Amino acid sequence: MNLPEFERVIYKRNPLVEVVCQLRFPPILKISHQEPVEFQDEIRSRYPHFETTKAQVPSEILNIVQQFGLPVQSDIVYSFKSEDKKWNLSITKDFIAITTSSYERYEQFKQRLEEALEIFERIYKPSFYTRIGLRYQDLIIRSKLGIEDKNWSELIGKHIASELHEPEFSSSIQTIIKNLVLKTENGQINLNHGLVTIKEQQENSDEIAYLFDADFYTEQKIEGNGDVWNRLNQFNQSAGRLFRWSITDTLHNAMQPQSVDST
C-alpha cells in the first residue's frame, strides 16, 4: 500500500491518547531470573517509580491451559514510570517497550527510546530483534474540538468508513469496529478503527467518539541499532500519512494543525 504524501504537521488539539513502541528479542533469561538493578540505576532519574506485574496470557492460550488444569505461568514485567506517570518503560525477558500518554512529537518520543535502548543494549546485549512495532491510538472527541454539530461523514473519509456516508441509516449507527491488515514495503499495519462510546468524567455522560488504533510492525529479523531507527522512522512517516488520509479537511482543520518548523 502506497500512502499519499501530506505535509507533516503537529496538531495543537492533539487527538493521541497513547503511543507505544515495543521491540521483541530472543529470550534473555538473566532478566527473568534477577531484578534489573543495574538498568534501574541508570534510568532512575527519569523513571523514579518502579513496580512489577505479571504479563497477560493470551485468552486462547489461557483457556487451553485451564482445560487441562495446568498452572498458568506469566512472565514478570518490570515497569519504570516517570514522576508524572505519563511515561512507562517496561522490560521482560523478551521485550522492551515504552508507552506514553503525553506524546507531543516524534523527535521527543524517539529521544526517550534511544536513551533507554542504549542502556538496555549495553547491559543485556540482545542478539537481534524479532519484532518491532510502533502503535498510535487517536481518539476523535467532537466536544473537545468544538465540532459537535458535524456529522461523522463530514469528518471521516468515505474510503475508510463508507457506512457513515449512507444517509438512510448513518444517523442510527452507534458503534462500528473495523479491522484492516495492510501490507506495506516496510512491514504491515494492523488498523482497528470505528465509533466507540466513551464516558466523559467531568460531564458524567456518554459520548460517541472515533478511534484510530494503528499498529505498524515488522517481524523480520532486525540487527543493529541503525536498522531499528530506520524502520521506526519509516513507521512514523507512514502513521502520519495514514491518519491524514483517513480524515477530512474539516477534521484536520478543527485540530489546528501547525507546521513542524513553527513548533
Image (cartoon, grey):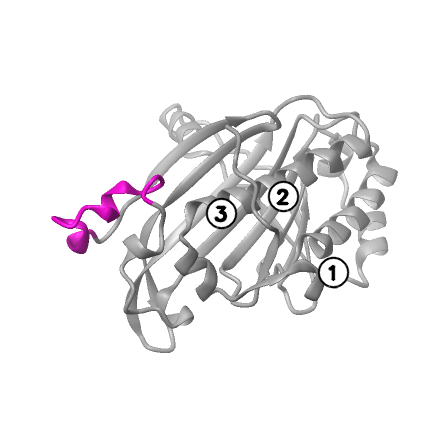
Q: Residue at x 81, y 50 (%)?
A: 115
Q: Residue at x 67, y 52 (%)?
A: 106
Mark 2 is surrounded, within 10 Å at the Cα level, by few (under 14), some (14 to 19) or many (20 or more) other residues, namely: some
Q: Kindly identify the amino acid type of the residue bearing the numbered disc 3.
A: Phe
In the image: residue 22, left or right of residue 211: right
Q: Which mark is residue 159?
A: none
Q: Which residue is mark 2?
A: 236
Near-viewer residue (80 or 189): 189
Where on the picture, by quarter, is residue 151?
A: bottom left
Is residue 76 among the parts visible in the rendering? Answer: no
Considering the numbered disc 3 on the image, is that residue within a helix, a strand or a loop? helix
Q: Which mark is residue 47?
A: 1
Near-viewer residue (78 or 233): 233
Q: Which residue is mark 3?
A: 243
The correct choice, above or below, for 108 with respect to 256 in the image is above
In the image: residue 243, left or right of residue 100: left
